[in-house]
Amino acid sequence: MGIPIITLASGQKIPQVGFGIGVLGKKAYDPAMTEKIKLALKNGWRHFDAAEAYGTDPELADALAAFPDIPRSELYITSKVHTSKGIQNKDIESSLRKILAETKLDYVDLFLIHNPFFPENSLTLEEAWRQMEAVKEKGLTKEIGISNFRPVDIEKVWKIAKVKPVVNQIELHPYLLAAEQDTVDLCKKYNIQIASYSPLVPIGRHGKGPVNALSEELAKKYGVTSGQILLRWQIQHGFVAITSTADDARQKAQSDLQGFELSAEDVKKIDEAGATYYHRFFGWGAFKTEYHSVL
């Protein structure tokens, strides 16, 4: 029962599945989002993934306030500085302090640079990473990391970092494992934990590929849901998975991942099925020109 806990290179513990509270383009306070997070807290979720770009910090604060008996030490909160705000304004600390004020927290557990595609006349990557190191030193975040960084971006940070990134959060699911293998391998070499967003794309946003039918077949075999199958696939690859749902039954199922284990043969079947089909859901920025396509 429950969600596995793993250890980052820094020694910090992190739940291996997190609840995403991202809504790009959100303009106003969303009570439904608050209720969604409250339901997740009720269903045992403790790892929440937010970002400056999502604008959901007030909703997170209100949801957490409804559960005052949950100690801060049991929560794992991730956030990210957005390249069109904190980095463009050349002040990452101000962005993080605003995030903390809106979430009513003293610190976040993990703070990421949301992507490596910086606007002109903003901070350089080196300047941005120095500021990330500074907010960690001040205790505003326990750990720092990166998101959507390709091997070339990772190498740039690695060469100049005094404090190394502990996480790289990328879109990753069976249809991207082969395409992202270089990124996965480099992160493994540097002991950077891969965190996957959109892990359920094969059965949700793009449920017409070969993994959809396979996950349903395996769900029957193991007596679980197809969502649990794909999250278990992430876990057994050693990734941290970030997912989200407002459905009570799905929340309960997707936070119950330790009661079964996929055989090595079934993990390989998912790998192989995914490798026959390519889909990147978030085809933006450099990913659109360099990678985005559907076979």
Image (cartoon, rainbow, N blue to C red):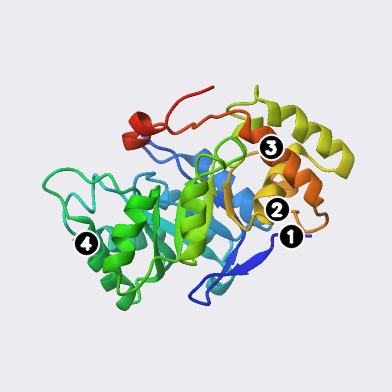
* Callout in the foreground (2, 3): 3
Q: Quadrant of the N terminus?
A: bottom right
Q: Quadrant of the C terminus?
A: top right
Name the residue that disc number 3 marks: 272
Name the residue that disc number 1 marks: 2
Question: Residue 126, which numbered label?
Answer: 4
| Percent position of residue 202, x then y | 63, 32
Tell me which numbered mark, 1 or 3, is placed earlier along the sequence. 1
Q: Hey, what amino acid is under mark 1?
A: Gly
CA separation in Å, label 1 and label 2: 6 Å
Question: Which residue is more in the foreground, 295 or 112?
Answer: 295
Local crowd size for mark 4, using a 10 Å CA cut-off: few (<14), some (14–19), many (≥20): some
Tell me which numbered mark, 3 or 4, is placed earlier along the sequence. 4
Q: Hey, what amino acid is under mark 3?
A: Glu
Q: Are marks 3 and 4 in contact (CB under 8 Å)?
A: no
* Callout in the foreground (1, 3): 3
**Left-right relation of 230 to 84:** right
Residue, x 59% and y 26% (percent of image)?
206
CA separation in Å, label 3 and label 4: 38 Å
Tell me which numbered mark, 2 or 3, is placed earlier along the sequence. 2
Q: Are marks 1 and 2 in contact (CB under 8 Å)?
A: yes
CA separation in Å, label 1 and label 3: 28 Å
Name the residue that disc number 2 marks: 255
Q: Are marks 1 and 4 in contact (CB under 8 Å)?
A: no
Local SS, label 4? helix
Residue, x 56% and y 59% (percent of image)?
47
Q: Hey, what amino acid is under mark 4?
A: Glu
